């Protein structure tokens, strides 16, 4: 009798590699190394609350090493995993001031650059709330065999060849796209394997969850203030008032809204003229995911993935989620300004 066992991420990557328009094995290798790094980071995050206890027992400094902050740790783990692989010639990370060049014999002919937010929502770690990792993959634009340059990283999001996120939540999931829809895999911790649990993810076209840090309300532009008031109005015919949900961890907020329908936004404010979120490490990869799932991501006026980046750590106002909700927010911005 044929048994039904889950499809593993490793099997899925190999199965789908023909959909990729470039040399197929390269991207598979790359995703495999991200998968491995995600498991290592997951293991550390799971024991985050033990750090002090274990430290007090004297096991913290066995090698004379200081306890590392988890976002630095996650950065190092992902950097290492990507460097151990011949497919990547450079990495830019939210945790590094400048991009890192891999230019030795093993890497110099490789074609991909990776941009990442190794630990998103890191302020949630100490309080046992979900955090994430976001990654974005491009083909380099400068000739292979030469060291990567800034222009390899400053590509618009519409040039991404793959992107994804890991959410370290009540269960750990890896969600990614290569431009052929979005698939989600849940980590089975007992065997350490990601299994396909959410095939072909689609975000509902409309929703009733809005996610924003309303504490910043006074700083928001008029269009955004009016949109928030719209979300709070009583109109049962349009399911309003909407439900307000804000974890403070973009990956987790986005993941919930992707499954249930909703909008997440981080607008500009007087204290943060372009908002807080970073175009290259956070906004573009999640925009690729949401568009592939049938949703929308904009800066309030323009498609996020069409913005030409000018600097690595560039910030942009961000509106992402169910298409109709993002369009409604844009209407308010159009009418009342941002
Ligand atoms: P990071 O931990 O990578 O710096 O990102 C935190 C981001 C994002 O995850 C979250 O939605 C947002 O910052 C929260 O910011 P506020 O506390 O200003 O709402
Ligand atoms: Mn982040
Ligand atoms: Mn981060």
Image (spheres, rainbow, N blue to C red):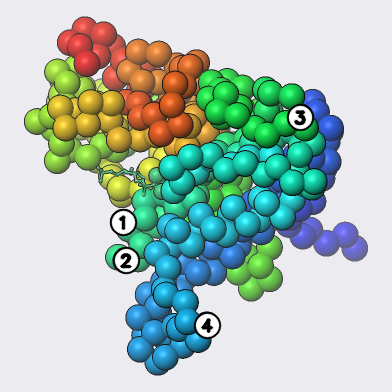
Q: Residues within 10 Å of mark 3 (few under 14, many from 20)?
A: some
Q: Depth check: 126 or 271 in front?
A: 271
Residues marked 3 and 2 touching at CB (< 8 Å): no
- What residue do we see at 28% from left, 30% from top? 275
Instruction: Report helix, strand or loop for mark 1.
Output: helix
Question: In 3D space, how far apart are the residues under numbered discs 3 and 2 (Cα atoms)?
Answer: 42 Å
Q: Residues within 10 Å of mark 4 (few under 14, many from 20)?
A: few
Q: Image height check: is 140 above or below 36? A: above
Q: Which mark is residue 123?
A: 1
Q: Earlier in the sequence, mark 1 or mark 4?
A: 4
Q: Residues within 10 Å of mark 1 (few under 14, many from 20)?
A: some
Question: In 3D space, how far apart are the residues under numbered discs 1 and 2 (Cα atoms)?
Answer: 7 Å
**Mark 4: is the Cβ under 8 angstroms from ligand 3?**
no
Q: Image height check: is 10 above or below 199? A: below
Q: Earlier in the sequence, mark 3 or mark 2?
A: 2
Question: In 3D space, how far apart are the residues under numbered discs 4 and 2 (Cα atoms)?
Answer: 24 Å
Residues marked 1 and 2 touching at CB (< 8 Å): yes
Q: Image height check: is 125 above or below 305? A: below
- Can residue 316 be seen by looking at this rendering? yes
Residue beneath label 2, please? 126
Residues marked 4 and 2 touching at CB (< 8 Å): no
186 relative position to 243: left or right: right
**Mark 3: is the Cβ under 8 angstroms from ligand 3?**
no
The image position of residue 54, as x and y in percent, is 41, 85
Residue beneath label 4, please? 63
User: Which quarter of the rendered image does ligand 2 occupy?
Assistant: top left
- What residue do we see at 35% from left, 35% from top? 277
Please tell me whether mark 1 or mark 3 is closer to you in this view: 3
Q: Image height check: is 276 above or below 13? A: above
Residue beneath label 3, please? 144
């Amino acid at each position: 009798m044929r048994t039904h066992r889950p499809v593993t991420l490793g099997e899925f990557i190999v199965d789908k590699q023909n959909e990729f328009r470039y040399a197929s094995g390269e991207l598979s290798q790359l995703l495999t190394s991200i998968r491995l790094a995600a498991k290592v980071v997951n293991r550390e995050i799971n024991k985050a609350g033990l750090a002090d206890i274990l430290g007090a027992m004297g096991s913290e400094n066995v090698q004379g090493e200081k306890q590392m902050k988890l976002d630095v740790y996650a950065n190092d783990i992902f950097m290492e995993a990507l460097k151990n692989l011949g497919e990547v010639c450079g990495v830019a990370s939210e945790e590094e001031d400048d991009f890192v060049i891999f230019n030795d014999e093993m890497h110099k002919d490789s074609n991909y650059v990776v941009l990442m937010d190794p630990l998103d929502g890191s302020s949630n770690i100490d309080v046992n709330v979900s955090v994430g990792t976001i990654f974005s993959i491009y083909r380099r634009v400068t000739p292979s065999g030469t060291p990567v340059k800034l222009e390899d990283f400053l590509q618009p999001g519409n040039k991404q060849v793959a992107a994804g996120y890991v959410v370290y939540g009540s269960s750990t999931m890896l969600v990614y796209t290569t431009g052929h829809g979005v698939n989600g895999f849940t980590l089975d911790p007992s065997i350490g394997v990601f299994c396909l649990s959410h095939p072909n993810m689609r975000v509902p076209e409309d929703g009733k969850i809005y996610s924003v840090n309303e504490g910043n309300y006074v700083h928001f532009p008029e269009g955004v203030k009016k949109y928030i008031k719209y979300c709070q109005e009583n109109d049962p015919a349009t399911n309003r008032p909407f439900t307000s949900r804000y974890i403070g961890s973009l990956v987790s907020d986005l993941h919930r809204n992707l499954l249930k329908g909703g909008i997440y936004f981080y607008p500009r404010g007087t204290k943060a003229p372009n908002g807080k979120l970073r175009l290259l490490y956070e906004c573009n990869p999640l925009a690729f995911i949401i568009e592939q799932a049938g949703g929308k991501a904009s800066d309030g006026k323009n498609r996020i993935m069409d913005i030409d980046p000018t600097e690595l750590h560039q910030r942009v106002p961000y509106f992402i989620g169910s298409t109709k909700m993002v369009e409604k927010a844009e209407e308010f911005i159009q009418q009342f300004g941002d």
